[in-house]
Amino acid sequence: MIYTVTLNPSIDYVVQLPKLNLDEVNRLETSYKFPGGKGINVSRILRELGYANQAWGFLGGFTGEFVSDKLNQLNLDSHFTKIADDTRINVKLKADQETELNAAGPKITKAEKQVFVSQFDELKENDVVIFSGSVPSSLPKTFYFDLIQKVKERHAEYAVDTAGEALKKTLPTHPVVVKPNNHELADLFGVELNSLAEIKKYGQKLIAMGAQNVMISMAGDGGMLVTKDHCYRSAAPKGTVQNSVGAGDSMLAGFTGTFDATHDPVESFRYGLACGSATAFSADIATKAKIDEILPQIKIEEF
Ligand SMILES: Nc1ncnc2c1ncn2[C@@H]1O[C@H](COP(=O)(O)OP(=O)(O)OP(=O)(O)O)[C@@H](O)[C@H]1O
Ligand SMILES: O=P(O)(O)OC[C@@]1(O)O[C@H](CO)[C@@H](O)[C@@H]1O
């Protein structure tokens, strides 16, 4: 079974207008509300691909009710810990440029945290836990790392989509896959990455530090997969970008779900790339039909 962890879910309020004028009232052309949060996006794609999974995390208040109702409507299996404070609202502004305003997140009490942590006792050998997204500021900075210790005690596997020191700290515990984007990879080492060869070199460093697979996302430039003995690269298929929010989560879902089922890194990378682009070319998180349409366009080569 695959479990996704979204410590800080959101309502994603996506607003579209031709141009943002600061210091003025701006009238929106369209606006949508989606259930958001990285792990929730991962769960939605896993479900589209037919992989049984359950979404975990914290939800509370009227905003939490909205997210919960939407997940029920999507028939998503979920088990969120109820909290007293309100789940956050993140604003995604699509104008001449894309701007995201992500809130810090709700207060989580000690008792609520305890209820959530006890869920990890349910894990079994060979389960996979996917940790994605920010940690609300009321939780300790080491929270992912502490949860990973629980996953390892239960002999389950895990994947992680986080950045900076939190990512570095998890590498020696051998995550199945980590998915930095090229900018996060550069920031991690305080360097600029100007070529695919450099991206490969720093991806290999993450392998040397303990990751089992390193998938580097590069938005419209496609992606790279670094394994212990190989490196694979693919450009992105062409299409009209509608809303790239969640493309990285979709990529992680495609890879991890396929890898759990097949243990084939190239096939998993293929699904990761197709899911990422399918979401970028959709208004919301991609559907199975969109993923199937993109899959034949993915061309992977050894690099
Ligand atoms: N404009 C695009 N055209 C085609 N494919 C795209 C585009 N944007 C993203 N993708 C696909 O989705 C993958 C993940 O996207 P991206 O690199 O933006 O992830 P990310 O930085 O983690 O994004 P986010 O945090 O918004 O989910 C890319 O590696 C690529 O395969
Ligand atoms: O603030 P975080 O947790 O880093 O990211 C949250 C978020 O931007 O990530 C998803 C897209 O990847 C959105 O659904 C959500 O709003």
Image (tube, rainbow, N blue to C red):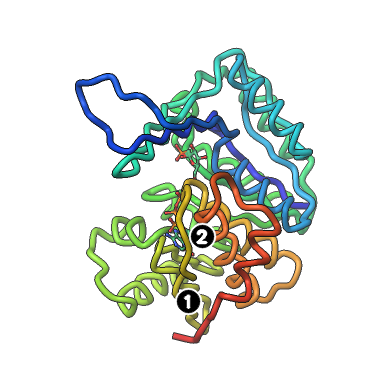
> Furthest-bottom residue in view?
302
Q: Residue furthest left?
A: 23
| Image position, residue 212 (x, y; %) | 56, 69
Decide if residue 224 is on the left or right side of residue 17: right
Q: Nearer the viewer, residue 188 or 142?
A: 188
Q: Earlier in the sequence, mark 1 or mark 2?
A: 2
* Quarter of the image with the C terminus in it: bottom left
**Of discs 1 and 2, which sits in the foreground?**
1
The CA distance from mark 1 to mark 2 is 17 Å
Q: Secondary structure at mark 2?
A: loop
Question: For residue 242, which numbered disc appears in the image?
Answer: none
**Mark 2, other Cα within 10 Å: few <14 / some 14–19 / many ≥20:** many
User: Residue shown at 44%/74% (left/top)?
Assistant: 235
Mark 1 is surrounded, within 10 Å at the Cα level, by few (under 14), some (14 to 19) or many (20 or more) other residues, namely some
Judged left or right of residue 152, residue 36 is left
Where residue 285 appears, as percent x and y from the top left, is 59, 47
Label 2, ligand 1: CB separation under 8 Å: no
Specify the label residue 178 is tagged with.
2
Q: Residue at x 62, y 27 (%)?
A: 58
**Residue 19, picture quadrant:** top left
Query: Residue at (44%, 52%) from the top-left corner?
Result: 167
**Image coords of residue 20 (percent x, y):** 27, 33
| Label 1 residue near ligand 1, CB within 8 Å | yes
Q: Amino acid at mark 2?
A: Val
Q: Is residue 89 above or below residue 16?
A: above
Label pair 1/2, CB-CB below 8 angstroms = no
Mark 1 residue type: Ser
Closest to the observer, 210 or 81: 81
SS under mark 1: strand
Residue 10 position, x and y percent, is 54, 30
Write down the residue under mark 1.
234
> Where on the picture, by quarter, is residue 72?
top right
